[in-house]
Amino acid sequence: MHPQFKLPDPGKCPICFMDLIPLDSGSDDEGGPRDLTVSETSKALMEIETAPVERRFVTAELRMVGKVDYDETRVSHITAWVAGRLDRLFVDYTGIRVAEGDHMVELYSPELLSAQEELLQTIKAAKDLARSDVSVVRNATEATVGAAREKLRLWGLTPEQIKAVEKRGTADDHVTIYAPTGGIVIQKNAQEGMYVKTGSRIYTIADLSQVWVSLDAYESDLQWLKYGQKVTFTTESYPGETFAGTISFIHPVLNEATRTVKVRVNVSNKEGRLKPGMFVRAEAQASVATAGRIMDTALAGKWISPMHPEVVKDEPGACDVCGMPLVRAESLGYVGQEPTEDDKPLVIPVTAPLLTGKRAIAYVEIADKEKPTYEGREIVLGPRAGNYYLVREGLAEGESIVTHGAFKIDAELQIQAKPSMMTPQGGGGGNAHAHHGAQVASGQLGSQTHCPVMGGEINKDVYVDYKGKRVYFCCPGCEGSFMEKPEEYLEKMRAEGVEPERVEVSHEH
């Protein structure tokens, strides 16, 4: 229990009073301070397993959670292009699927009525002046007709509707608004009979043939994520079925509350099975090279849009969304280098190191020894990638490292008071008992700082004088417990390296 005590003869530990045990005479006393030599039988009982330190490409596996969301680039709004009254809504509840060109709203607008009459009047005037010999007047009239048509177009009338007005020869006090795109009506912002202003939103339509999956990635996992990387995910709605997509955007800002970053995955949804709001569990894999670099060549040789990275083509050209020229994916840092043998990182299994938070200890089997001998080393680890740690310092390729049983080796080193995981300087547990034990072994006893009964910090106002010794306590009440077994408490204090201060015997106290 307290390996810092070593006596030449059998006896008891002065701290815990356990019987001392003999040291293993078979241990290698000539080894280093961090070495442990055991017999083959002991090795088998300790179930020690080893594996070589090697260079190899490893795969980092990331798990993320998130939900299905609308593709913001495929969400459109139907608004009133001119002020008026909504006399009829052909779609009167959300969730309805509409196609491009379906009628949505019938709007009454006095302004639109006046604009139609203006068009008809200019057309009539143009016909009257068609035979005019003055070309300036004729051209001006034709320009006025064009301006009247453009005015109606800007107020939301389609070319077909404008032609219908001209053919009919009379103005219509109602205009029909059509769906600009197909999709699902996800919002209905108006009711029949409402008066609306120019720009008032009436419907919102979302095209769900492609959706976004918005995932939360921890900041420690960002090093493994890249644009164009494949991601697979599952949903509760379709157990046992896996969906796939590619990373099209990594948000540049970290959420300080959750310490996560939003990662967007574009997913084709032609059948409409994925519904916005569904929760998903996603996985991504990255091939890792030296220094934690990702060897992902999925976008190698591709052309990509700087503003819309989801637009990827095999040849140069323009972005389908914004028209910007495409650039090589390599120029944006979206592609890892082609792997070579020199890129293989030095790795060890995750079961090999003992981690204390700030330090990592690994035990290496020393070659060319008659008996199994293990050396403890403090190593510097890189990031974890799947079932492996990348090694930055402390190990060399080809060395044999303990992957199972390292904790038992470390415990044996502690028993022998050698440097170990928790006691890097050796000498046992490195706690208060070890300090007091060293004082006992050297014959030096310290002053009292803690209550012998409860262990709390002493209060100088609470004490008992016993046989010329003043014993302090943490609180009133401990004196009674002490006086029930004073000799036992004094012996315990001395075993812990504490000697009560001497006082003159007073009969008044």
Image (cartoon, rainbow, N blue to C red):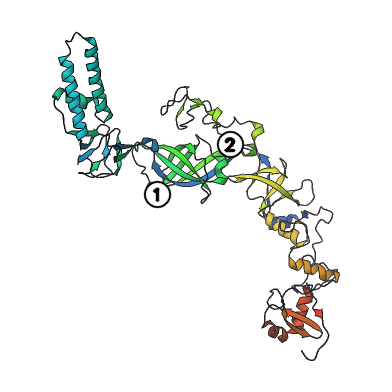
- Give the distance between the C-alpha atoms of the residues marked 2 and 1, in whole angstroms: 31 Å
Tag 1: residue type? Glu
Q: Is residue 310 left or right of residue 447?
A: left
The spot of residue 191 in percent (x, y) is 23, 45
Q: Is residue 119 left or right of residue 237?
A: left
Q: Secondary structure at mark 1?
A: loop
In front here: 450 or 197? Answer: 197
The spot of residue 456 in percent (x, y) is 68, 74
Q: Residue furthest bottom?
A: 507
| Residue 89 in view of the camera | no
First in sequence: mark 2 vs mark 1: 1
**Residue that mark 2 sits on:** 294
Q: Is residue 138 left or right of residue 27?
A: left
| Residue 28 in view of the camera | yes
The spot of residue 149 in percent (x, y) is 24, 24
Task: Quadrant for the C terminus, please.
Answer: bottom right
The spot of residue 275 in percent (x, y) is 36, 44
Q: Residue furthest top?
A: 133
Residue 168 bears which disc, if any? none
Using the image, determine if residue 437 lies above or below residue 321. below
In front here: 67 or 111? Answer: 111
Tag 2: residue type? Ile
Residue shown at 24% from the left, 27% from the top: 152
Mark 1 Cα shell of 10 Å, populated few (<14), some (14-19), many (≥20): few
Q: Secondary structure at mark 2?
A: loop
Residue shown at 45% from the left, 46% from the top: 66
Task: Quadrant for the N terminus, please.
Answer: bottom right
Residue 236 bears which disc, if any? 1
